[in-house]
Amino acid sequence: MVAALALSLIGLLACTQVAMVFLHVAPSNTLSKQHGKTIDRWIYPEFEQNWKLFAPNPLQQNVAVHVRADVVGADGRRTTRWMNLTYEDGEAIRGSFFPSHVDQNELRRGWDFYVNSHDSENRPNGLRGDLSERYVRRITMLRLSERDYGGTIERIQLRSATSSIAPPPWSNEKISTRPVYRVLP
């Protein structure tokens, strides 16, 4: 009985996913116009299309996302050290024959989403600004929830460390490879 109910629920979710994706990519029609906001809430940001897959731009910078947390416990309030989540993602897939796309891309794409929807002062520059910030913070909180900090996480702070990729040895190009930090409030 429980297995049949679980299978029915999985089937219903799968059908809903297929229908939402179809309505999202289909040409504009009455149904997608009437329920556009609902469809967008289902699709973005987890299932967003990225056409860069077909015309990639080689990376010229390394971007690492760091987080620290204010933790309140029995011994009072303390702030953790900065943790490099990008490094942890790399370690999680290193040596894996079949690394997960989520492990490889979730944080990077989430950070990219945030940067593209905010200005250099971390102010939203469009309608998706708040959504992108909530998405990055949700990813981060999921990562932090896997650890025990001896208390409750009250607040998190994010930053990125962006450093240019050094030119090849045969190049005469001179660039600084020192990281530049962008700290979110």
Image (cartoon, rainbow, N blue to C red):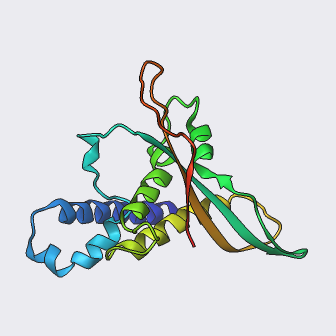
Could you tell me which quadrant the C terminus lies in? bottom right
Residue 180 place in picture, x, y as percent? 55, 52
Q: Position of residue 56 (x, y in %)?
A: 29, 40
Residue 160 location (% of width, % of height): 55, 56
Q: Is residue 157 left or right of residue 118?
A: right
**Furthest-right residue in this view:** 75
Q: Nearer the viewer, residue 98 or 62?
A: 62
Instruction: Kindly identify the residue that appears in the image at 43 percent across and 64 percent down.
Output: 114
Answer left or right for 155 relative to 179: right
Query: Above or below — where is 183 with respect to 64?
Result: below
Viewer-nearest residue: 20 or 27: 27
Please state the horizontal and vertical placement of residue 168, each as a whole percent of the image.
45, 24
Which residue corresponds to the image point at 28% horizontal and 55% vertical from the top-left? 49
Front residue of 149/182: it is 182
Task: Please identify the residue farthest to the top as the structure is shown.
Answer: 170
Q: Nearer the viewer, residue 69 or 35?
A: 69
Total marks shown come to 0
The residue lying furthest to the bottom in this view is: 34
| x 18%, y 60%: residue | 25
Q: Quadrant of residue 88?
A: top right
Q: Is residue 90 above or below residue 28?
A: above
In the image, residue 31 sits, relative to residue 24, either above or below, namely: below
Q: Residue at x 43, y 18 (%)?
A: 170
